[in-house]
Image (tube, rainbow, N blue to C red):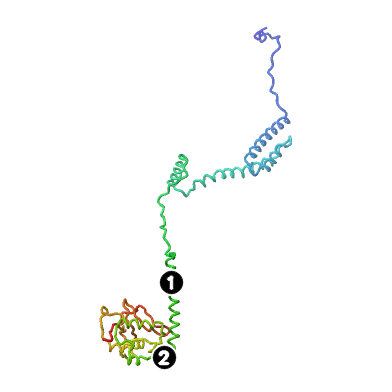
Amino acid sequence: MTLGNNLESSDSPQIQPQAPKFSSRRELRASEATAQRAAVTDRGVAATIAARKGKGAQTASTVSAAGKGSAGKPKKKPALVNLAVMTLVVPGLFATVALPAYAFTPGSNTASENDASAAARSAIQATQSQELTVTDVALTAATRDAFTATTPEQLQASQAAAARQVRIAAQRAAQQQVYSSYSGPSAGDYVANPAYPNFSLDQVVSVARSYQGVPYVYGGADPSGFDCSGFVQFVYAQFGISLPHSVTGQNRMGTKISREDARPGDVVIFTDGSHNGFWMGNGNILDAPRAGKAVQTRPLWTDAYHIVRLGI
C-alpha cells in the first residue's frame, strides 16, 4: 500500500502530529542551576590563573566553595568574591607588565636620545663588542704638586753646612774664652810699636780675619770685645796707623774711592755714619755686627755706603 492510497482511503488510520513535550518546572530549575554552576566554575578557574602569584590560596578556596553549591538556587556570595579578586588582581598584572617598559625608555628622554641609544645597542649586538667610543668629554689636565723630593746630594750638602756651623760656633766659643781674658797690647800700644811696620791691604785682611768670633761689645776696642769702629781701629793700629774710635772720624781720615777700585782691606762706611767694617769684595763686609753677634763676614744688606782707603 502506498502512502497516497493511505491518504485517500477513509478507512485507514490517520497519522497524528505529536504535541511538543514540555519540561516540568522542577526540571527547568535544575537545568538553570547546572548552567549557573558551570559559569561560576569557569570564572573561578580564570581568577585562579590570574592571581597565581599571591592570591592562589584565597582564589582556590573561592572556586572550591563555588563548585560545591547546592542543587537548588546558587549562592551569589562566591561570584561577588571572584569578581572583587579579578578587579584587584588584573589591573595589578597590567601595571607590573607596563613598569619595565617605562623604566627602559623613560619619558624624560628625547626622541634623538632614544634613537642614539637604540643605534648603540644595535651596534654592540651586531659586532659583539664590549667597547664604546665616547666623544665630547672634557678632561681635566693633571697637574703635578709643587713639592719635590730631596736628593742625596742636597741632603749631604745640608748636613755638611750644619756641621760647618757647629765647628764655627765651637771655634768662636773658644776664641771668646781666650779673648775674654785678653791682657795684650792696646791700640795705642800698637801705634807706638807696630806689629806690621810695612803696610799691606792683604796683610790687613789676614789680621782682621784672625779676630772672627770675637763678641760684639759696645765701646770695645780690643780682642775681649769689639764694636764696629773699635774693630777697625785695633787692626789698623797694628800697622802704625792711628784712628779715632768713631765711624765719622775714620771716614774723615780716609780717602774716598770708587767701588770699582776698592780692594779687600779698604773700609766700608755707611752713608748715615751708623756702621763700618772691612770691604771683603763681592759685596761682602767683615765687621762687628751688633749685640749678641760676633765678628764675621757677611753680605752687605744695603746700597747706602761708600769706600775709603786708609794708610796712603
Q: Residues within 10 Å of mark 1 (few under 14, many from 20)?
A: few
Residue 170: name its quadrant: bottom left
Residue beneath disc 2: 183
**Secondary element at tag 1:** helix
> What residue sits 69% from the left and 19% below the top?
18
Residue 285 percent coordinates (x, y): 34, 80
Q: Is residue 69 above or below residue 220?
A: above
Residue 176 percent coordinates (x, y): 44, 85
Residue beneath disc 1: 160
> Which image quadrant: the N terminus?
top right
In the rendered structure, which amino acid carries the disc numbered 2? Ser
* CA distance separating discs 2 and 1: 36 Å
Residue 94 percent coordinates (x, y): 57, 43
Q: Residues within 10 Å of mark 2 (few under 14, many from 20)?
A: few
Q: Is residue 220 above or below residue 57?
A: below
User: Would residue 8 appear left or right of 182 to someone viewing this image?
Assistant: right
Residue 138: name its quadrant: bottom left
User: Would residue 62 appear left or right of 307 to someone viewing this image?
Assistant: right
**Secondary element at tag 2:** loop
Q: Nearer the viewer, residue 74 or 174?
A: 174
In the rendered structure, which amino acid carries the disc numbered 1? Ala
Q: Nearer the viewer, residue 17 or 136?
A: 136
User: Would residue 140 appear left or right of 45 to someone viewing this image?
Assistant: left
| Upstream in sequence: badge 2 or badge 1 | 1
Q: Which mark is residue 286?
A: none
State the count of labels: 2
> What residue sits 62% from the left and 40% below the top?
50
Q: Is residue 108 above or below residue 152?
A: above
